[in-house]
Amino acid sequence: MTHAVRPTPRRLDAFTLASEPGNERLALARVADSVADVGLEAARLERLKTAVAEATMNAIEHGNGNRPEIPVEVEVTQDGDDIIVAISDRGGVAHANSGDHEDPDLAKKLDGEQSPRGWGLFLIRNMVDAMDVTTDGHRHTIKLTMRTGGAAHDEHV
Amino acid sequence: MTSMCEATTRAVPGAAVIEIRGEVDGSAAAVLTAAYKRAVEAGHAGGDADSEPGTVVLDFAAVDYINSTGIALIVSVLARARAERRKVVASGLSAHYREIFDITRLSDFIELFPDLDHAVSQLTRPAA
């Protein structure tokens, strides 16, 4: 009996961004470049870009408080069929990437019972195959996984 | 690398068209609010006492980015339009943003058309 050998994870890119509103666009562009050759289908790439932008926005705004001197760290890794984007800030446990928020309800929003905002985490969860959040002291990381061969939430398409 | 949001309004029979260009994010709030107000105040969307409530067409054909804050702005426009008994339709969304309109359920409240021509021809078609 033989066992398939799982390849060693390969880092595709790692970079930091100043915590300034709008820099999420830099993150999504650079992540898109870094995964250009891994065979991610176009629609899934668009989903990953949206998830990366939303997670980076949260890191900038809620994690690092829009303070440019505190960097957001982004690392892109390929692990077998998985593309993993890890986005870290210094927000600790108490910010919007923590994943324990109520899902937005559009009907309630239209009736004024919920704020029109609050779509970020909901979008992230629906765009990627997996979302994991870890906190180590002040360091808070959201890890987005997109499988190159899989299909994130294709029931929506 | 960012392109600021711009919006222009024009009238078609029974509806106002708001053509949006650039990015629909937090910086688009004033632009979208002003465009909606302009469209409605100019009477482009109809809705006077003698007619059916008007329709607002949001055309996204020249939009290259919508984020969660932009979704919130669209929700606000939709909420205001519904309060005024106006219908909102959308055109020109890419496949990706159509999917986001589905996931957020915006497409339950906003009819989607592939492009502005389809939206306008549907809106101006005489009732059967």
Image (spheres, rainbow, N blue to C red):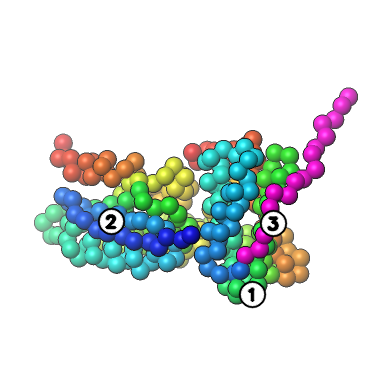
x, y (%) of residue B28? 39, 64
SS at circle 3: strand
Question: Where is mark 3, residue-wise?
Answer: A14
Q: Which residue is mark 1?
A: A69
Neighbor class of circle 2 (other Cα within 10 Å; few <14, some 14-19, many 20+) is: many
The residue depicted at 28 percent of the width and 52 percent of the height is B57
Residue numbers of the magenta segment: A1-17
What label does residue B18 carry, if any?
2
Kindly state the secondary structure of the residue where label 1 is placed.
loop
Mark earlier in primary sequence (1, 3): 3
- Left or right of residue A138: residue A68: left
Nearest to the eye among marks 1 and 2: give it: 1
> Does the magenta portion include B2?
no
Q: Position of residue B98 (x, y in %)?
A: 43, 45
Q: Locate residue A109: give its quadrant.
A: bottom left
Q: Rounded to the nearest whole Å, what is the CA distance between mark 2 and mark 3? A: 40 Å
Q: Is residue B43 left or right of residue B7?
A: left
